[in-house]
Amino acid sequence: MASCNQSLPVSQILKTKSEIEDEPKKKSREDWRKAKELEEARKAGTAPAAVDEEGKDINPHIPQYISSAPWYYGTTGPTLKHQRPQEEKQKQFSDIHEWYNRGVDNSKIITKYRKGACENCGALTHKKKDCMERPRKVGARYSGANIAPDEFIQKNLSLSFDGKRDRWSGYNPSEHKAVIEEFQKVEEAKRHLKAEKLNANEDTDGDDEDKDEDKYVDEVDMPGTKVDSKQRITVRNLRIREDTAKYLRNLDPSSAYYDPKTRSMRENPNPTEDDIYTIFIILGILEKILFVFTGDTTNHAKAQLFAWEAYEKGVDVHLLAEPTKLELLQKEYEKKKEQFKTKVQGSVLERYGGEEHLQAPPKSLLLAQTEDYIEYSRSGKIIKGTEKEVIRSKYEEDVYINNHTSVWGSYWKGGQWGYKCCHSFVKNSYCLGEAGRNINVPILDSKKVEKIEENNGDEDGTDKLPDKGISSSSEENVTMSKSQKKKRKIKEKKNKKKDKLKEALKAEEANQKEAEQILLMNERKRPYNSMFEVKKPTDEEIEAYYLKRRREDDPMNQFL
């Protein structure tokens, strides 16, 4: 019997007879077919979806191994409850409003000492060694007076993950009412004082009246704002855009660490420099001296000051809104100011005299000496000094002789240099102007003629350049022959290329015939090829090879 029970599965041992009888019967083939059709219709959307016990639709596309509940779950219809968290297995956490009680329990008034209570204060929730009250001369056990109330018995709170990390857990919002009430009292007192000052007609400065309101406002005017003593202007603390950020002063990765979250630098970015310089860098004073107050910044500051002064005098002008108008006003003001100064100076000189002292020569001419240091070399050149040395050549520059308007060497033609103004090729000649251009022709020496012939590469030697005393018509013939020579050269190159190709074709035919003869010979009688010179084939030899080679795939190959 024991062996029979051991062979049965655990599920069958746990089943009772009644449970076996309640099991659904096996479905027939027709029932399976109907269930399959209903499932397909639900997936297609033609049939309504299945509904669970809570009235919620079940997605028909959920796989069967997820939607079907196990046999031991005891479901009566389609459901997905077995896939959701089970309520009986869920851990219950404390509510958000539940927290430990603070203070002591004043609901009960105790007048008599209780057995087991603290001997010092009489509270029942702790012992004498745990009592936080000052030790009494006569304890509550013996005196029975001033028995302290009991502390709350704290319950064990079950906090969730978020509950353990809640920074406002146990906070009572009613405690903030005391802060609000205190602030309202301070504001009421301020209004009362302000009303008393207004009633007493006390003249107070605008900055002192609302000192607390402007507590976090810098008393600095931004560029472009108007300054008026009767009008109070508040400006927010903004960084000047010209200032370099502290973390950009030293871009070395191993330098001081900059924390972007708190916008603070823990160390000095330039620790190796002098102490005064580092202090200037930290305070930003050196940057303002070097960058902010240089160049056009000073002019901008002067223009801003002029705009403020003009506004005080009643002229409504703004630097940023009307810069052109402000600049014209400033120029006109400076001009009139200078005229006024000269007028006053002239009136003083007319009245008291002494104009001759103002027209005295400079001290450098009177004393024949100056404080300017100039150092000269032995040849008289300036080595050091205020005057810069002008670099010049040893030849005279821009010196025109014999009525010429250009220098020698400004014109070149036919291998000779001359003057550009008259085309004269004779140095130190007299300029003839336009007439000289029509007369002057370059005179070529025999050596120069030979060089030109070599450069032109006349192989035939039929065309020769003219000798001395050549006329203007012969010059035109020389220029015409140049183009003809170029054409002749091109033709000669083409003819040479054709001749080389013919020779290469003949050599290729000879090589092919020799190769055929060697192939017909016996292998033992073939000559050695040890004296053959191996060199790179020329372009003509490659072209000849491509022209003479046999193409096996050519259909006309058999007719050759």
Image (cartoon, rainbow, N blue to C red):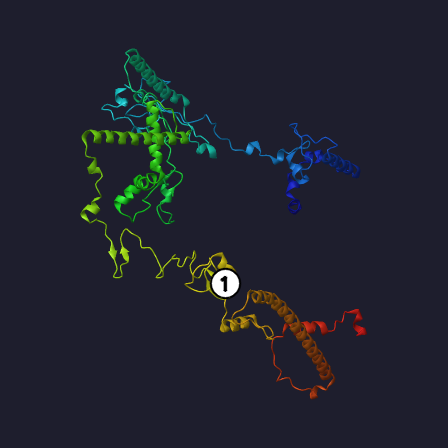
Determine which residue is flagged by label 1: 440
User: Viewer-proximal residue, 266 or 219?
Assistant: 219
Please report the residue visible at 69 percent of the width from the left and 86 percent of the height from the top.
Answer: 526
Determine whether the residue tagged by mark 1 lies in a helix, strand or loop.
loop
In this rendering, position of residue 187 left or right of residue 19 = left
Q: Identity of the amino acid at label 1?
A: Asn
In this rendering, position of residue 37 left or right of residue 371 = right
Q: Residue 169 sits in which quadrant?
A: top left
Q: Residue 26 sits in which quadrant?
A: top right
Q: Position of residue 138 (x, y in %)?
A: 23, 23
Q: Position of residue 30 (x, y in %)?
A: 80, 37
Taking the view exactly as shown, the residue that stands out farthest to the bottom is 525
Q: Position of residue 140 (x, y in %)?
A: 27, 22
Q: Residue 361 sits in which quadrant?
A: top left
Mark 1, Cα crowd under 10 Å, few <14 / some 14-19 / many 20+, is: some
User: Viewer-proximal residue, 175 or 390?
Assistant: 390
Q: Is residue 159 visible?
A: no
| Quadrant location, the C terminus | bottom right
